[in-house]
Image: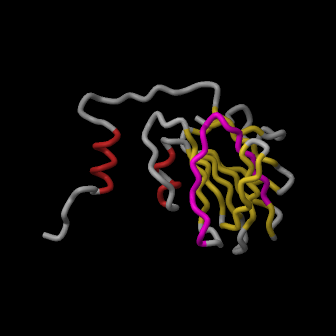
Amino acid sequence: MLNLITEEQLFGEDNFALNELTVHKKDSSSMITIHTYIGDLYLNSYWADGLIVATPTGSTAYSLSCGGPIMVPGAQDYVITPIAPHNLNVRPVVVPDDRTIRLKIEGRGKEYLCSLDSRSVTIDSAVELTIKKANFQINVIQTENQNFLNTIRNKMMWGLDRRN
């Protein structure tokens, strides 16, 4: 789980996500710039339609569809995945989940969208987003006849010869 920290408490008391935090443009065809920091160290300024910070659970959802890696359950990492980046050499980055990720957004438009899983709010460029690991975990049920590797292999059709 990840925890979004802002001065504005954007999502009230429920500033947590199981899958991902996403920032993206709103009401504009122009790209936005997301200045990204790991702790106090500058990582990159992403020129893109948006940026995803995904947990291992979220790595198989929106992040995967944008070219992000699949992370196995229990990985102690987040993945930062750009959405339609302007630069072709920009790729997803895996970050240990004990690090703080900070995002500052700018662009031609005055408003942007911030989403935690399926919930979205409008923000402006004055809002700085800080992402940390939540101080709690959730328990997920796994049945005996299912496991992550079998599920992902079947859904991705890995190892199947479809030529016949």
Taking the spot 78% from the left edge, 58% from the top edge, the residue there is 105
User: Outermost residue, left direction?
Assistant: 164
* Foreground pick, 125 / 28: 125
**Residue 99 x %, y %:** 67, 38
Q: Is residue 3 visible?
A: no
Taking the spot 71% from the left edge, 70% from the top edge, the residue there is 31
Rendering colour mode:
secondary structure
User: Outermost residue, front direction?
Assistant: 41
**Residue 87 x %, y %:** 64, 72
Taking the spot 52% from the left edge, 55% from the top edge, the residue there is 62
* Foreground pick, 17 / 86: 86
Whether residue 92 appears in magenta in the rendering, the answer is: yes
Q: Is residue 72 left or right of residue 145?
A: right
* Foreground pick, 25 / 48: 48
In the image, residue 40 above or below residue 82: above
In the image, residue 139 above or below residue 60: above
**Residue 95 x %, y %:** 60, 44
Q: Quadrant of the C terminus?
A: bottom left
Q: Is residue 124 visible?
A: yes
In the image, residue 26 above or below residue 71: below
- Image quadrant assignment for residue 160: bottom left
State which region is magenta.
88-105
